[in-house]
Image: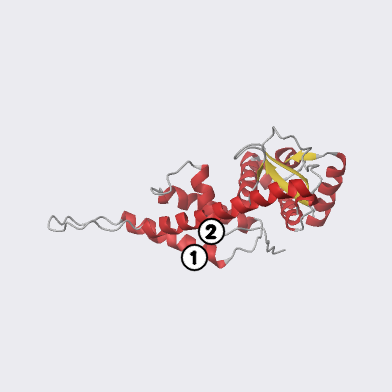
Amino acid sequence: MKIKLEIFEGPLDLLLYLIRKNHIDIKDIPIALVLQQYLEYLELMKLLDINIASEYLVMAATLIQIKSRLLIPKPPSPEETTEEEDPRQELVRRLLEYQKYKQAAKFLKEKETERLKYLRRPDSLLNYNPEEVYFEASIFDLISAFKSVLKDIPKEVFLEVIKDEFTVEEKIHDILHLLLVEEKVELGELFKKAKNKLEIVAFFLAILELIRLKEISAFQEGLFGKIVIARFNKAYV
C-alpha cells in the first residue's frame, strides 16, 4: 500500500531537523554526516512504503554533488588570490531563508493559538497544565522514534517466519480504542505492544494516517523528548 501524506514537510525541513538534532552550525554543515543521515531517513520512508516526493531525491543529489566537490583536492595556485566559493554556500543561503519563513509562520501560529484561548474553552488535549511545556512532534520526530524502535529489535525477529497479518485499518481501530481508555499514550510504550516488525510498521502507518485525518496529535515532552499521542484537540482548530 503506497501512502501519500499531507503532513509531510519538504527536504529543507528534514535538513533543518537534522541540523538541530545534531547541534550543527547551519553556516558550517558537515555534509558527509548530514548526507548519511538524510539517506537513512529516505530509506525508512521507502521501508514504510511512503511516496517520496521528487524534491527529496533532488536534494539527495544536491548533497552528493556538494560532497563530491568538497572531496576534490584544490590544486596549489600561489598566484591565485581569489578565495574559491564554498560549495555549501548556496545550500546555506536557502536554509537560512527558509528558516526565516518557518519562524515567521510559527510566530503567527502562536499568536493565533493565544487568541483562540480567549475565544474557546481551554480544556486541553493533554489535561492542560500551564507549567508543562509540549512541543508538537514533526514527521521527522516520528520517523526518528520509529528508527530507534527498529534498531532495538533483535535480528532474530527479522528472520522469523511471520504468520500473522496486520493491517493499518486494524491498528487505527486499536489506537482509537486505547485513547478512549487512556488520555495519552507514549509512542515507545505503544510500539512495545507489537509482536514483530510488521506490526510495528502497521502501528506507525496507522499513527501517520490518524494525524493526517486530524483524529490524533503527536507531542514531545521537551525538545527531542519522548513522543506522546492523544486525541486531536478540536478546540484549537
Q: Is residue 68 left or right of residue 14?
A: left
Give the vertical position of 153 relative to 82 (above or below).
above
Residue 164 seen: no
Residue 226 seen: yes
Amino acid type of the residue tagged 2 in the rendering: Pro
Which corner quadrant of the image does residue 104 belong to? Answer: bottom right
Report the coloring of the rendering: secondary structure
Q: Residue at x 46, y 50 (%)?
A: 34
Amino acid type of the residue tagged 1 in the rendering: Val
The numbered mark at residue 11 is: 2
Which corner quadrant of the image does residue 169 belong to? Answer: bottom right
Which residue lies under the disc numbered 1? Answer: 58
Q: Residue at x 43, y 48 (%)?
A: 26
The quarter of the image holding the N terminus is bottom right
Q: Nearer the viewer, residue 7 or 149?
A: 7
Measured as percent of width and height from the top left, residue 47 is found at 63, 56
Q: Residues within 10 Å of mark 2 (few under 14, many from 20)?
A: some
The quarter of the image holding the C terminus is bottom right
Measured as percent of width and height from the top left, residue 115 is found at 71, 49
Give the vertical position of 77 relative to 25 (above or below).
below
Q: Residue at x 73, y 58 (%)?
A: 212
Q: Are marks 2 and 1 in contact (CB under 8 Å)?
A: yes
As helix, strand or loop, the secondary structure at mark 2 comes to: helix
Q: Is residue 124 left or right of residue 132?
A: right
Q: Is residue 13 left or right of residue 194?
A: left
